[in-house]
Image (spheres, grey):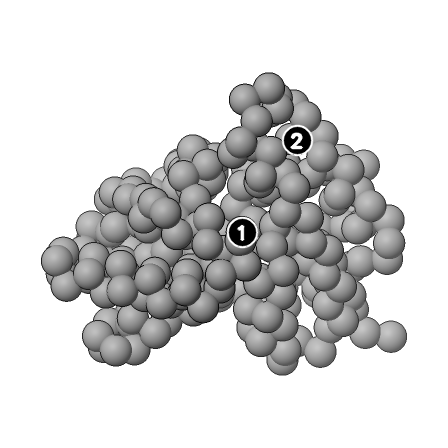
């Protein structure tokens, strides 16, 4: 019997990215989608961080108990809330940003890291800094948030989001050619690939080495 990967998303638009990227693994992909946490964290001041962490923990426990051999979390905010692999599970948990961190830390020059969801920046950068410290690296990274775009994804305006994000990424690349560009969220990868192809430059993102990471995880 083949392996099963349980995938936890904050929005259904991420499913296609993962299906295409992991198609060659031969694993069954079970997708779980819950946009509610992102909405509550960004809109409700009374929603506590411990509530957010409990919600993510419950979701991961449920997926692990549903027969998954590995769990992939594609939302950087969810992964930041989870922090560590749940002690109650023997199922490995992989965050979408983990192979991305390796790419960022492996680059020697200055980098510009782009976000569209401001709420994910703090947790993602804390995790990046922890990863860099653990491997003895100190990447030269500046963060920039492209406001007004993530809301389009959450409203289901995917085509408009991708077009406007593509234009914004292209502007960033042409106005600041001295730095490597990378996008920090899965929802940004299609536009990053399009901009990179048009400009003839590599733009880093989380899907670059995800297949190899998941293959290694399933072997354990």
Q: CA distance from mark 2 to mark 1?
A: 21 Å
Identify which residue is drawn at 86% across, 57% down. 67
**Category of crowding for the residue at label 2, using alpha-carbon neighbours closer than 10 angstroms: few (below 14), some (14–19), many (at least 20):** some
Identify which residue is drawn at 34% across, 74% down. 194
Residue 130 appearing in the image = no
Instruction: Please determine whether, in this image, residue 15 is positioned above or below residue 194.
Output: above
Residue 8 x/y as whole percent? 67, 53
Q: Which mark is residue 154?
A: 1
> Which of 2 and 120 lies nearest the eye of the viewer?
120
Displayed quadrant of residue 181: bottom left
Helix, strand or loop at label 1? It is: helix
> Which of 138 and 159 lies nearest the eye of the viewer?
159
**Category of crowding for the residue at label 1, using alpha-carbon neighbours closer than 10 angstroms: few (below 14), some (14–19), many (at least 20):** some
The N terminus - image quarter? bottom right
Q: Which mark is residue 53?
A: 2
Identify which residue is drawn at 24% across, 51% down. 111
Residue 114 x/y as whole percent? 33, 50
């Amino acid at each position: 019997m083949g392996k099963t990967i349980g995938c936890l998303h904050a929005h259904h638009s991420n499913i296609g990215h993962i299906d295409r990227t992991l198609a060659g693994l031969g694993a069954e992909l079970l997708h779980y989608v819950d946009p509610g946490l992102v909405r509550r964290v960004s809109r409700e001041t009374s929603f506590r961080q411990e509530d957010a962490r409990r919600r993510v923990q419950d979701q991961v426990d449920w997926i692990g108990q549903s027969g998954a051999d590995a769990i992939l979390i594609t939302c950087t905010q969810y992964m930041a809330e989870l922090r560590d692999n749940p002690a109650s599970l023997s199922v490995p948990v992989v965050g979408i940003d983990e192979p991305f961190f390796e790419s960022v830390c492996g680059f020697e020059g200055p980098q510009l890291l782009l976000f569209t969801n401001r709420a994910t920046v703090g947790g993602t950068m804390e995790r990046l800094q922890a990863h860099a410290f653990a491997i003895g690296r100190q990447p030269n990274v500046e963060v920039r948030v492209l406001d007004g775009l993530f809301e389009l994804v959450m409203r289901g305006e995917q085509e408009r989001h991708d077009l406007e994000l593509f234009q914004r990424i292209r502007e960033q690349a042409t106005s600041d050619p001295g730095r490597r560009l990378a996008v920090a969220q899965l929802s940004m990868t299609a536009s990053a690939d399009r901009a990179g192809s048009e400009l003839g430059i590599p733009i880093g993102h989380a899907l670059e080495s995800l297949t190899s990471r998941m293959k290694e995880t399933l072997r354990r």
